[in-house]
Amino acid sequence: MPPGPPRFPRVGTSITAAVLPSVQQLKISENQSPAPQDRIYTSFNYFDNLNQSRNESLGSSIDHIKVYRYVLGFEKTFLDGRASAGMRLPIDTLTSSSRLPGFGGTSTAVGDLAAIFKYAFYQDRDTGSLASVGLMTSFPTGPNRFAGARGFNSFRDTALTPFVGGILNRGDLYIQGFSSLEIPTDQNQVTVLYNDIGLGYFVYRAPQPDRFLAAIAPTVELHVNTPLSHRGFGGPGNVLNGAFDVVDFTFGSNFLLGKRGVLTVGIVEPVTGPRPFTLEAIAQFNLRF
C-alpha cells in the first residue's frame, strides 16, 4: 500500500511547508575519496534559492531559502591501509523569508551523524589506481525540522548507502567516481541512485613536495541523481518528499598544501529542471596524517 500524503499546516490557500529534499542527506561522494585515508576534514557548502520554482508552484509561503552547511569528519585506515572507518557530522544553518508570522528567519541545528566504511579490493600501489566498496550509514541524530527551522519538516530515519568507487591514475591525469544507492528505512523517504564521476589534471607540481603550494589540480565533475521512488511532486506521498532527476556539473580546483593539506574550492551548476538550487559553492579542507 503506498503511503498517504504527509500532513502540513495551511493558512488560507498557501501552504506554509516548503520543499527541501535536495540537501537533507549528504552523498557519499561529498568530500570523500574511493581510497581509504588517514585524515581529519571539514567542508562548507552554500546553497542559494533552494527549490524556488517548486515552492512557488506549490504556493508555499516560504521563499528565498538559503542553506549553509558545515561538516566535521575523520577517517582512519586499518588492514595495512586497504580499509578505513570514519564518521562525519553536518551542522546546518537555514535562512528564509515568509509573509506569515513565526516563519522565516535563521535557524541552526546539528544534522544526521554518518558512519562510513570502505574496503579497497583492488589496489595498484605503483600508480594509486584502485577499486573499492563500502557502506555509509546515516543515523537520525538531527531534529524533526531541517536545521530546526519551522516549516521544514523532515523524516527521521536511518539510511543505508552501499557504494562502489574507483580511481584511475595516468600520469598527471586522474579519474575517480562513485556509484551508490541511498536506501531509507522509512517508506516515506526517497530511494535514490547516485552516479558521480570526476576528471582532474595536475597543471602544477612543485619541485620539492614540502613547498607550501605543492600542486594544483583543476577538476570537473558530473553528478546524476536518479530517484527510484516518490518521483515528482504532487502525487500521493509526494508533496513534500518527492524528487526529480537532477544532473549537475561541478567546476573547481584542488590545491595541495605541503605534504598533508588539501584545499578544494568549487561551484556547482544544475543543468536540469526544475532546478534544485540556483548555485552551490563549496570549500573543503583535508589534513592527512
Image (cartoon, rainbow, N blue to C red):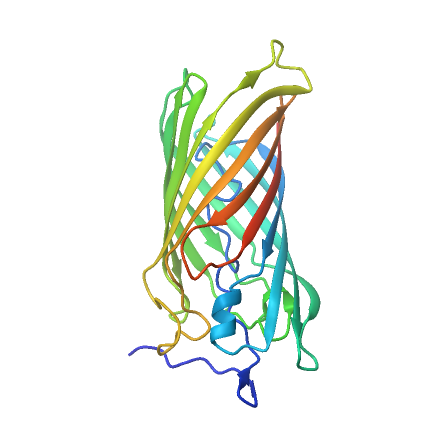
* Count of marks overlaid on the render: 0
| Observer-nearest of 261 and 53 | 53
User: Residue 192 location, x and y as percent?
Assistant: 37, 57
Is 214 placed above or below 277 here?
above
Q: Position of residue 176 (x, y in %)?
A: 41, 33
The percent coordinates of residue 67 (x first, y second) are: 62, 58
Q: Residue at x 49, y 41 (%)?
A: 250
Q: Position of residue 201 (x, y in %)?
A: 47, 24
For this view, does 254 lie left or right of residue 221? right
Work out which quarter of the rendered image holds the C terminus and state it.
top right
Q: Residue at x 33, y 65 (%)?
A: 229
Q: Quadrant of the N terminus?
A: bottom left
Q: Quadrant of residue 167?
A: top left
Q: Residue at x 67, y 77 (%)?
A: 103
Q: Quadrant of residue 40?
A: top right
Most extreme residue toward the left, as rendered?
Answer: 1
